[in-house]
Image: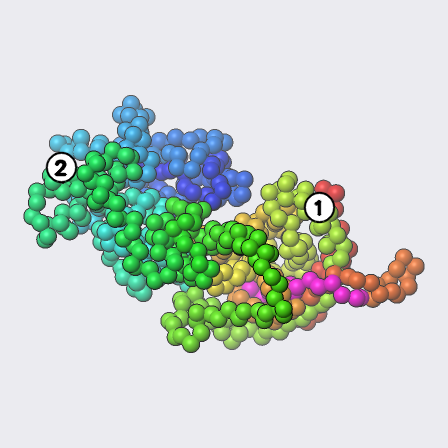
Amino acid sequence: MSETVKMPALGESVTEGTVTRWLKAVGETVEVDEPLLEVSTDKVDTEIPSPVAGTIEKILVEEDEDAEVGADLVVIGDGSGSADAGSDDSGAEAPAAEEQGEDLASDETVAPSTEQEEPAGESEQTAETSGDSAEGQEVTMPALGESVTEGTVTRWIKAVGETVEVDEPLLEVSTDKVDTEIPSPVAGTVLEIRVQEDEDAEVGSVLAIVGSGDAAAPEAAEPAAPAPKAEEKPAEAPKQEAPESEAPKQEAPKSAPAPSAPAPQAADSVSGAESSGYVTPLVRKMAAEAGVDLSTVKGSGLGGRIRKQDVQQAIDAQKAQAAPAAAAAPAASAPAAPKVEVSSLRGTEQKMPRIRKVIGQRMMESLHEMAQLTTAVEVDVTRIAKLRAKAKDEFAAREGAKLTFLPFLMMAAIEGLKTYPQLNSTIDGDKIVYHGSENIGMAADTERGLVVPVIKNAGDLNLAGLARQIGDLGVRAKSNKLVPDDLSGATFTITNTGSGGALWDTPIVPAPQVGILGTGTITKRPAVVQNAEGDDTIAIRSMMYLFLSYDHRMVDGGDAARFLTFMKKRLEEGAFEGELGL
């Protein structure tokens, strides 16, 4: 049996990618989740893992060629067909699979060829079918990182009997590194769930069975009516083919009540949300509090999923419509006190999320293992503020990334790590390991909790490269699109506490690193500066604090002070014109 590997979704606004390098050649074997090829987009360069194990039979997109999302990249077989990979037979299978529809999974697209070969060994084909049903395919726990051997099923997004598309989120899994959604590798109906919520599953174990739905329909129908199977299949057809406008007129009254069926399940104004796919509790609550009917909101997420941004746009549209009416109303005699938004968590008791347990455990371990303390300096970033204001619009148009203050701070920190490698080291028993690259962890505050995506080899990037990486990882962290490799390998961490308005903080060093840099909020205030004649004067300046927590076993106070003073001088000089093209 052969399967076709397609170009996966590489981001919400990414429609295609360029194959930069094949890591496997025709005739070589590949394991599940083993890197198969490298793809480059205008946002990121990444490795594409193989969704199946087998032998490379045919490469369909060569290096330096572009491929759209969903396009066929390579054909992988079990090895039996590798000798004929270049024959006319293998070329004939691909068009046949495309005619069945690009939404079909690779295992299902080869079903016709499997049926043609049944006379040669029908029993062997039956034995190779995964799952309890000949119509179903096993969904297994994928590899979630090099050191991760198992994960906990935190929530099933799809229930038994529900349909799922290829790459549509099927369940949520939590590990000690990341909480992530597991997409379905095939399209079909969820026939069986093998691992329940809050249960652990090892990598490679079977999570669910997804099939065409034909096998599930008779099981549900037989207890109620012992009608022949031939009569049950037409009953399934109107549900899927009704949108194609070919359903008989007699069937229209039966399908009409379907959209209103979810209404009794909701207790607020979001009763139509189910028509747009899964809606997170946060989005549902946000819409309910604002009086937004989710059935009227168009989702911009994967598979039409409604996201926070979509609800916010609907809220803004409502406010814009209400503004003229509010302007026409007479002004109140006295300003009303601001309304206090009471959290729905007030007075409740809930199970602690796994990510909070992991964060708590690691922070306590870090505090117990290290002798931690914090040193701070004050920095005048007025020159950088002026450079940024002058260059940010042209920079965004040229580089496709926002020019925030963080790339400047990160570049100064990276240069400081190269100069003072004590901060970019690890204690390994009685040895000190000075790292040969600067992998910068970037602490990100998300709805689920704290995550720290990593910019690998940050010391090789210029200001524009850092800005692009910061933007890409930040967006994927907020939308829960990070993969385990994005969260591993940091040698030094930066936490931008100032983004929330904090002046300074005492962050905890994440083991096995020996340092973490915090950046406070930037405020304008009077400061003493020297004029051109060297006289002291008072001026309005943009000021901020930098604070460094470090492991005193490796880093002394003098080391910390020198590192921070290096950063202070670099930032106050503001010599970044060359990086900005000014």
Q: What residue type is labelled 1?
A: Ala
Q: In this view, does 314 lie above or below 104?
A: below
Q: Is residue 370 above or below residue 544?
A: below
Q: Can residue 170 be seen in this view?
A: yes
Quadrant of the rendering where the C terminus is positioned: top right
Boundaries of the magenta span: 513-527
Q: Residue at x 8, y 42 (%)?
A: 228
Whether residue 412 sits left or right of residue 26 in the image: it is right
Residue 388 image point, x, y percent: 71, 50
Residue 227 image point, x, y percent: 8, 45
Image quarter for residue 95? Answer: top left
Q: In this view, does 145 lie above or below 372?
A: above
Q: Which residue is drawn at 40% across and 46% down?
A: 304
| SS under mark 2 | helix
| SS under mark 1 | helix
Q: Which of marks 1 and 2 is nearer the N terminus?
A: 2
Magenta stretch encompasses residue 523: yes
Q: Mark 1 points at which residue?
A: 391
Q: What residue type is labelled 2?
A: Glu
Magenta stretch encompasses residue 235: no
Q: Name the residue under label 2.
A: 122
Residue 458 image point, x, y percent: 60, 51
State the scheme by which the image is colored.
rainbow
